[in-house]
Amino acid sequence: MDTILQTLTFHKTHKGIYSSFRLPGNRGSVNITNSLFIGGVVPATIQVSCLVPEGFGQVPDDAEKAAVAAARAQEKADKAREKAEARVARANAIAEKAQAAAAAALARAQAAAERVSGDEAGA
């Protein structure tokens, strides 16, 4: 781990209780109670010592970026394929139910037709 020193600039005072400081270029802020400052006078900048892990902030080369992008694209494609397969399975189940209902309706219609033709032959 490396130690770095960051300079934070004063952002604003909040209800006179604490002040916020920001690292230029970042939206986040560090809030510090005003009682920590000598005489309650808030400085324009403060310096903060930070521990940074090895390799933090290093920009990966193009090959690493491409590999990461390819892995993300593959994961996205796999999820889309699984989702499409699930939709196909649901559609097939609905189609099977519809075919079974149609076959049952056809069987009922044929049975009714046979009854009607049997009644006419017997009359």
Image (tube, helix red, strand yellow):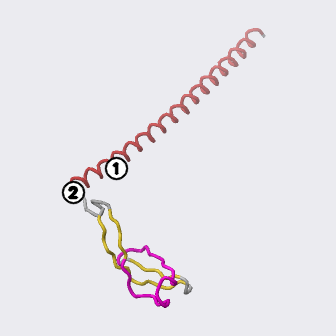
Residue 72: which numbered mark, if any?
1
Residue stretch in magenta: 24-47
**Relative image position of residue 55 (x, y in whole percent):** 27, 60
Instruction: Choose the circle earlier in sequence order: 1 or 2.
Output: 2
Q: Height in image: 82 above or below 14?
A: above
Per the image, label 2 sits on a secondary structure element best described as helix
Of the 4 image quadrants, the one containing the C terminus is top right
Residue at image coords 33%, 45%: 74
Q: Height in image: 96 above or below 56?
A: above
Q: Residues within 10 Å of mark 2 (few under 14, many from 20)?
A: few
Q: What residue type is labelled 2?
A: Asp
Q: Residue furthest top?
A: 122
- Give the camera-side residue of 87 and 51: 51
Q: Mark 2 points at which residue?
A: 62
Per the image, label 1 sits on a secondary structure element best described as helix
User: Viewed as shown, does residue 62 lie left or right of 103?
Assistant: left
**Relative image position of residue 109 (x, y in whole percent):** 66, 22
Q: What residue type is labelled 1?
A: Arg
Q: How far apart are the two marked residues, 1 and 2, measured between alpha carbons?
A: 15 Å
User: Viewed as shown, does residue 123 lie left or right of 26?
Assistant: right
